[in-house]
Image (cartoon, rainbow, N blue to C red):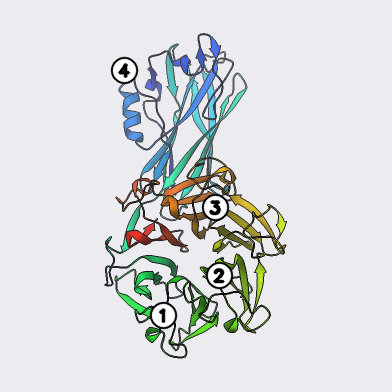
Amino acid sequence: MHVKTTTLALAAAIAIAVPPPADAQWFRDGVRAPDQSWSKSEGNFGAMLLLSNEPDEFLDNWVQRTPGVRISTTRIARRGEPLAPFILFIGCQEDDRGGCHARFDLEVIKPDGTTLFRTPDLELWERKPTPAEGTLGLAVGYAEIEVGDDDPLGRYLVRAVVREEVAGITLTLEQEIELFGTVTTVIGDGTPGLSETQVNNPYGVVIGPDGLLYFCDLDNQLIRRLDLATGATETIAGNGERGYGGDGGPATDAMLNMPHEIQFDARGDLYIVERDNHAVRKVDMQTGVITTVAGTGEAGFSGDGGPANQALLRAPHSIVFTPDGQLLICDIGNHRIRRVDPATGVIETWAGTGEREPTPDGAPLAGTPLNGPRAMALDPDGNLYLALREGNAIYRIDLAAETIHHVAGTGEQGYTGDGGPAREATLAGPKGLAYAAGGTLYIADTENHVIRRLNVTTGVISTAIGTGERGDGPEPEPRRCRMNRPHGIWTDEAGALYVGDSEAHRIRILR
């Protein structure tokens, strides 16, 4: 983020009459208006914080004393566009020399609650007479903010602490601003196919150790790799036939059956979870050979305590590696999470009882039911986030304490709650999770055709991409871009979000 602070020219001229009278912003029929987060008053002094993404136009209105100037604020920021906080005020008290003395501190707070920047002691109105009755004053101190490519998406808080020093009044003003990126297609043209520019119902996506984009081309029964720089694609696993075969040979000669998600282990080998083969398979990225890690190709539930490749799974959907290298599998048809020790190959039930019952908040993981464990994502602090598809909720599992905690979704199906507590929001069959640096959890809210954004620090949920209507675009405005049952999502180190927009037959990127 680039910040430029300066002092406005023509400061003495920047006061303007507005109909209705200026003090109507703070006093109505002689009665003090209720304070709001962005507009407060005390005594005869009132101040408000406005945000503008067209600061030049805003200032032109004031300098030209445009009659009836419209007072408005923006709540949306975009990369590369200037954003300026302005403070308007009335009624500063003069000292015995006829001058006001008012200053303010300006702070911008990131979505994770940390300070992005703080600029202290800017001039509001110093050694000048108070603006005439019926006029608003505009702060002389001025900051212009430009959001950079490395600043995280999400909800920022702009805070101004305004000090009217003669009267001894301090007002703290706050405005929230949502930083939206742009969404574009990295591969796909909206029609199902198999080419350098086409995909067919893409699901899981991940950036590999080589920096390339790997994805599950579901209805082509392939795992493919895309060079984001050149646009070239390559098949990594699958021969295009739906089935179960090829273990011990080249992965590109093997049959796959509805590959849903992929992950890399610490060695750089690729793991594939195949729903309809009821199995997890591994591609040795040095040799290109494919083998089965868990499952037999048949549906069922058995094998705990024994070799994972002799155990039965039922429609597994998602996989993740814990910080100590254990492989976790969302065995959704069995309402369990299974764990495989790669060193021994032994499988066990790690979470879930097999019952389709509600999950109590704060419960021990052992013995607690999970209703449709569908997707998982790790954060850097040793927490595993879990989406319950049938449960329409998101939970956080403390890996150290092995307890489970409710973070989003009421359990009812719906699309409500944006801007409020995530625990009171409704979801519709969430099927993908991705954690981004800075405390953002993205949720593929599949049956709502949107990607939701959860600030894990504040607990507030919002929509990052989509309208709630099924469709395909238009790009690049994220909140105007309709999607069609998105599934797999992934964030890279720069905070960009990749989305398998499945039935739109596109992979999109938000950055």
Q: Between label 3 and label 2, give the one nearer the viewer.
A: 3
Alpha carbon separation for disc pair 2 and 1: 24 Å
The residue under label 1 is 243
Check if mark 3's residue and mark 1's residue have beta carbons within 8 Å: no
Q: Is residue 273 above or below residue 114?
A: below
Q: Is residue 306 above or below residue 205?
A: below
| Dot 3: element | loop
Kind of element beneath mark 1:
loop
Q: Which residue is mark 2?
A: 320
Cα–Cα gap, marks 3 and 2: 20 Å
Quadrant of the frame with the C terminus: bottom left
Q: Quadrant of residue 350?
A: bottom right
Is 181 on the left or on the right of 110, as rendered?
left
Q: CA distance from mark 3 to mark 1?
A: 31 Å
Front position among marks 3 and 4: 3
- Report the residue marked by disc 4: 67
Q: Nearer the viewer, mark 3 or mark 1?
A: 1
Q: Which residue in the protein does label 3 denote?
A: 392
Q: Helix, strand or loop at disc 4?
A: loop
Depth check: 150 or 262 in front?
Answer: 262
Residue at horizontal 56 percent and vertical 50 percent from the top: 112
Whole-number angstrom distance, CA of label 2 to CA of label 4: 61 Å
Distance Cα–Cα, label 3 vs label 4: 52 Å
Amino acid carrying label 3: it is Asn
Amino acid type shown at disc 1? Gly
Disc 3 packing (10 Å; few <14; some 14–19; many ≥20): many
